[in-house]
Amino acid sequence: MAKKPHVPSFEQTLDILRAHSFNVAPFAGVPGGMLVSKHGAAAVLVPSRQTERPVAYAVHPGALVRGEVARLLDRGYQKFIHTSQFELPATAAQLHAIHTFSEELKQLIGDACLYNESLGTTSDLYQYDRLKGREAAKPEPARPWELASGH
């Protein structure tokens, strides 16, 4: 009979991250959230309700900018680091740091490592410049049976 794998608790997972040189600190923006950072990237983890996965993301991995986890924004031609205060073009070093951090974090917390994410840094928000504005509502179709104004 196969043995059931040991699933560490949320606190045990945080201890594992500390043992692998991650900085772990409470995060004020999320109740019960812990800011986990390394390599200039960070994520906010919270206890999960699922017993097989004790850790969940409150804020997905991103660059750590002034104590805030920045979102990675893809505009088609370039990736940007987006915070609540400003938006900057992402450098290759930042993208590499986010990718390295994400891969190492997923491995340690027992999250699934997906093939497309292993190829490079993926964004969680896509805004292509040529498509911007296309989502606007279309005008109502003409109703020939109604009288137009001015007749």
Image (cartoon, rainbow, N blue to C red):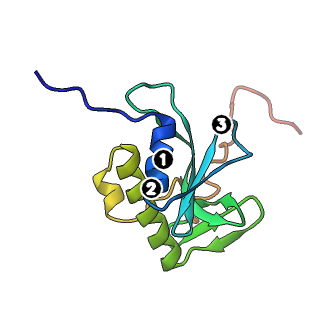
Query: Disc 2 and disc 3: Cα gap in Å?
Result: 21 Å
Q: Tell which residue pokes out farthest to the right in this image.
A: 150
Can residue 130 be seen here? The reply is no
Q: Residues within 10 Å of mark 3 (few under 14, many from 20)?
A: few
Q: In front: 121, or 97? A: 97
Q: Residue 53 location in percent, x, y?
A: 41, 33
Q: In front: 119, or 141? A: 119
In the rendered image, the quadrant that contains the C terminus is top right
Instruction: Answer with mark 3 or mark 1, whichever residue precedes in sequence.
Output: 1
In the rendered image, the quadrant that contains the N terminus is top left
Residue 19 shows which numbered tag? 2
Q: Residue 105 location in percent, x, y?
A: 43, 54
Residue 58, above or below 121: above
Question: Could you tell me which secondary element the residue under label 3 belongs to?
Answer: loop
Q: Are the two marked residues, 1 and 2, in contact with CB atoms closer than 8 angstroms?
A: yes
The amino acid beneath tag 1 is Asp
Q: Which residue is mark 3?
A: 32
The amino acid beneath tag 3 is Gly
Q: Is 129 placed left or right of 144 in the picture?
A: left
Can residue 82 be seen here? The reply is yes
Q: Tell which residue pokes out farthest to the left in this image.
A: 1
Query: Disc 1 and disc 2: Cα gap in Å?
Result: 6 Å
The amino acid beneath tag 2 is Ala
Q: Which residue is mark 1?
A: 15
Task: Residue at 45%, 25% (x, y): give it.
Answer: 50
